[in-house]
Amino acid sequence: MSSSAPFSEAALEAAQLGPLLEEFLPASTWHDASGEKLLAQLALLTRAQQEFVLHWGPVLARNSATMAYGMARQANAAFACMATDDIERWLARAMDAYDKAGLSAAFAVLNHPARFAEERRSAATRLHLDEALGVLELFACGLAGRQFQIAEGDCAHSDSATFFLPASLEHYPRKEDNFLLYKGMVAHLWAQVRFGTFAGAWFERLEAYPDPERALAWLNVLEAERLEIRLRKIFGGLMRDLDTLDGGARPALPGGFAEQLAAPGAGVAVSLALLDAALAHEPPPLRPYVGELRPALVRLAMQTRIPQEKAALVKALGKWLDEIQPRREDAPQPEIRAGIAAEAEERAALDIVVTLDGKPVAPPEKVRELLGSIALDLGEIPPEYLVPAGPGASAPEAGKTQKNQDAASAADAYTYPEWDYERRNYRKQWCMLRERALAPKGDDFVRRTLARYHGKIYQLKRAFEMLRGEERTLKRQQNGDDVDFDALVEAYADLRCGRELSEHVFSRRLKVERNMALMLMVDMSGSTKGWINDVERESLVLLCEALEQLGDRYAIYGFSGMTRLNCEVYPIKEFAEPYGDTVRRRIEAVTPRDYTRMGAAIRHLSWRLNQVDARVRLLITLSDGKPDDFHDQYRGTYGIEDTRMALLEAKRAGIHPYCITIDKEGPQYLPHMYGAVNYALIDDVKRLPLKIADIYRKLTT
């Protein structure tokens, strides 16, 4: 029952409340003198307030009956100092604390409703991190370098992978301005990673100063000046907004410092070189968005990450080379080289150039991500990092399943929140998702599909050719592909009349390029076993053949999962990867796995899709049923609402989601998840492969 619904009935008496509490609280927890007191207290509430307690009690009891009992005990105090909306926020704070740190942390919130009420009274000014977290996480997802997390901290700082932000901000008198401050903090912390604040071995060097804390404070000032110059080139609008709030007053530096820090290519080494001279002065105050430098946290994170990424890169390189061409034990090792392209300080991306036996190549996304992350940490990619694992080294150990290995370690996992509709809030860092390699298979499925649909494929290719940008001729150009004879004749006539000869006598053919990116998300849950799986694979083959004709960028990932700790996606084709025999063999390896856990997969693939620079981004889901995970309560309304929230997050990030399903019950839940016109129900599965291509054609015209 909704907590905001009005009630005209009389309040329930203690005897009536007892059986209702027993529905979600074991009698043993409150059937004593304190229980009688609890019932007497609840009987003093209005009927609407009692219904509120009876609604939220089961929600909390789903996590802990003790927490539900604690809420009921504090209900009278909460209603005495807060409105219903604020009480809901109070309960959400308690449940979030329970997820992060357990029962004692939850009761630290539940036992002090008046303290929370006081916080809410300053809410007109104060912005809580929880309120801004969704948008800030989307902002962080779009930043280049590595996948960054956002967590609560005592001030703004970073360990080079996680951005720690204050639990709340009230620096400015308006919430909107405090949100800009949060965003500025995230941008600055990212710039520390992107532009090498943590590169080089300067951590120990600072400890040698007589006053290390003063040296660290000055280094933070110098780095803030250096990074602000870079940020103004990338986030000019954001920096101008921050200037409006605080006047843009930058720290007053000793003479000549600002010019050296602004020099093209200046890195942290310049700040370190200026440090001795700077220590003769008092460090000036920093701009509000600049936090602290905490080298101990950075060092610890890098000591953990660097060897892990080196091992992961060696393994990924070996897998990549095996996919290009199976290697023999006695074959010579191919020569791989990688380096950082010429620095472009006005760009967010760190460009990595890779060569294989002297020829430039485009590595898989996983390899490119690892190379970029290693380059951010070390400022280079050492040659010893580029020795791939030997043939077959990427296979899991005999007798161990991949899932069992990963259950013991979260090093290779991405973490994502999950929306709890009953809480009306996120469970933060709740799901662990891993990218799983599909071992290429060779069962001749693709060849049989191409032969079976030979005529239809020809029709599809012809239809998709119609979507390609038409060429048009630009006339009277200063340079071009051909001579514009009309312009040449006019120019000759001008010359004969004594006028100056025009240089615009060429024509140039301009092809109107499509600027689109497609992510196809394929259900690999156990319910697709049998003919559904065959139809899905046929669909992938036909769509790939058609898309190759069109030239659009596209990627294909499968998804499945079992519990929040084992969400999985399976790269079938990555954006930078050509469609060839390796991708075809992966399509053949698409087989049913676990359950249809969709929210985490949508969030991860949306992040992947947002790494592609495209005007239009499509996320098309191919599924045979609704979100479901039997082992983790991810079913029914809970799974649908989390999936819907993940799709709303994708839409806010500029992605257009669409669903194609063969579930006849789809119209009962898909309009709520995707919108009334963003899904299609296919009732004749034999037409599914051709229908997918037809739907894609309609979405992109």
Image (cartoon, helix red, strand yellow):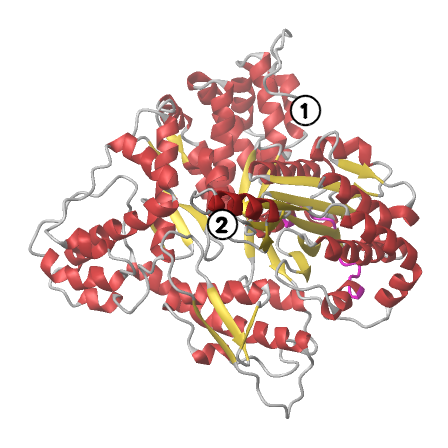
- Residue lying at 71% horizontally and 63% vertically, measured from the top left: 579
In this rendered view, identify the residue nearer to me: 526 or 248.
248
- Residue type at mark 1? Pro
Q: Nearer the viewer, mark 1 or mark 2?
A: 2
Q: Name the spot of residue 160 as percent of width and height, x first.
A: 38, 57
Looking at the image, tell me whether mark 1 or mark 2 is earlier in sequence order. 1
Magenta span: chief secondary structure:
loop
Report the Cα–Cα distance between label 1 and label 2. 87 Å
Task: Identify the magenta region.
Answer: 588-601
Asked whether residue 599 is drawn in magenta, I would say: yes
Q: Residues within 10 Å of mark 2 (few under 14, many from 20)?
A: few
Q: Which residue is mark 1?
A: 19
Residue 478 circle label = 2
User: Residue 6 vs residue 498: left or right?
Assistant: right
In this rendered view, identify the residue nearer to me: 372 or 171.
372
Q: Quadrant of residue 407?
A: bottom right
On the question of residue 561 being in view, the answer is no
Q: Name the spot of residue 237 as percent of width and height, x first.
A: 38, 37
